[in-house]
Amino acid sequence: MLIRHSFKIAYRALKINKSRSFLTILGILIGITAIMMMVSLGNGAEGLILGELSGFGGETIAINAGQEPSGPTDFAGALYSDSLKDRDVELLRSKNNVPYAKEVEPMVMVSEDIAYESETYTPTILGGSAEFLTRVFNTPVGEGSVFAEGDIRQRAKVAVIGDKVKRELFGESDAIGRNIQIGDFKFRVVGVLAKRGMVSFFDMDELVIIPHTTAQTYILGIDYYHEIDVVAESIDVVDQTAADIERTIREAHNIDDPDKDDFYVTTTQGAIEQIQTVISTLTAFLSSVVAIALVVGGVGVMNIMLVSVTERTREIGLRKAVGATEGEILQQFLLEAVLLTSIGGLAGIILGGILSFLISLAMAQFVAPNWSFSFPFSAILMGLAVTSLVGLVFGLYPARKAARKSPVEALGYE
């Protein structure tokens, strides 16, 4: 029997029992919809995070104080580690130690509110080189200018503020030359960053940059750094530069065992690979959990097909009596099972795409402006393949049972 004839018979059988077919399809639809949403949202999250990381520059290497964190509490502990100091910066700037280092800039992080007259705001405050940070984060100054290296050496109380900080404190008034309060000290605003948004996990519009020397001396009261950023000469030498950095700091800190490092080095590419691995693993795990719904749907398909075989016993006997082979009967019922699951799968792919798009719009509107909708073609192929496989696996037993029925017994079945 031709496939198109089998298809017509299968379609007619499903159409006769519309309610039963719909309920059977529903289990597959829910499972595929959930998996499609997991894949789409996982790709969206990965794209957002990698986009933020790429804004930091592929040649940039970050050296953080403390041991590499293994949990949320470790990040807080790193802020109190005093392992990175001026001596480390000078050693890293030496071409004898790190030959491919083009720039080496230390940074500290300040947790303070800022104020202007009666207005207060809680921004992200970084102590470092404004010229370096604006260049690395590709954020130009919209008004005024960045403070100079001389201001860093002299521990000047100057600040470059983000666009949102300016609007929150000064409204539409000019901020250049005004004094803002950070901690117990007044800082003169010398520059306002152009509106930029999120870059590498920093909202540049909410950023305040002050000289790291000023932050260390007057606000934090420390003589160490939270982070040192090194820019390699090219992406090709990033791994070599990272290795040179580790060797140099270990020698300076008299560390023989890498497990006892009091610092950790992160490259943009390394961070990207780690995040890709984590998100892919999480997406696969969540998809496997959601796939339980497909198993439940598959059991429903098997159950309905067994009922269908029982109801159509006389039809099977009649077809065998007029010459239908076991293979043709098997093909017929397998096709019905695959058709059931494929319809559910196709509907699930469409519904999953629509829901993922709506959720992506909501995420972009209320959570992360840079969140983008992603629904890869490979996910569609995977959805169709999985539903067809479910139809074959869970339809095989009922189809074999139908194919092996004796035509004599089947014709006499009441």
Image (cartoon, helix red, strand yellow):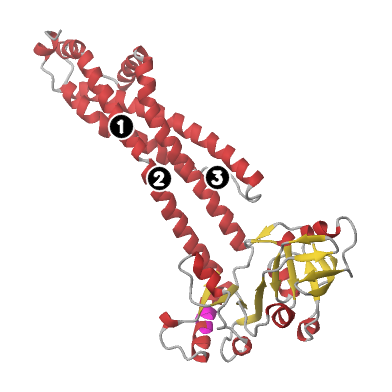
Label 2 sits on a secondary structure element that is: helix
Evaluate whether residue 208 shows in this view. yes
Q: How crowded is mark 1: few (under 14 residues within 10 Å), some or many (20 or more)?
A: many
Q: Going 38% across and 26% down the picture, which residue do you hit?
A: 25
Label 3 sits on a secondary structure element that is: loop
Q: x, y percentage for residue 169?
A: 82, 60
Q: How crowded is mark 3: few (under 14 residues within 10 Å), some or many (20 or more)?
A: many
Q: x, y percentage for residue 201?
A: 62, 61
Q: x, y percentage for residue 12?
A: 34, 14
Evaluate whether residue 141 shows in this view. no
Residue on which the image places disc 3? 374
Q: Magenta segment: does it hold 47?
A: no
Label 1 sits on a secondary structure element that is: helix
Q: What stretch is highlighted in magenta?
A: 240-245
Q: Which of marks 1 and 3 is in front?
A: 1
Q: Going 60% across and 76% down the picture, which residue do you hit?
A: 227
Q: Magenta segment: does it hold 242?
A: yes
Q: In this view, does 67 lie to the left or right of 52?
A: left
Q: Going 86% across and 56% down the picture, which residue do you hit?
A: 171
30 or 341: nearer the viewer = 30
Residue 205 vertical position relative to residue 3 in the rendered view, above or below: below
Return the mark for residue 298.
1
Residue 157 vertical position relative to residue 305 in the rendered view, above or below: below
Return the mark for residue 263.
none
Q: What residue type is labelled 3?
A: Ser
227 or 248: nearer the viewer = 227
- The Cα–Cα distance between marks 1 and 3, rounded to whole angstroms, is 28 Å
Return the mark for residue 287.
2
First along the sequence among labels 3 and 2: 2
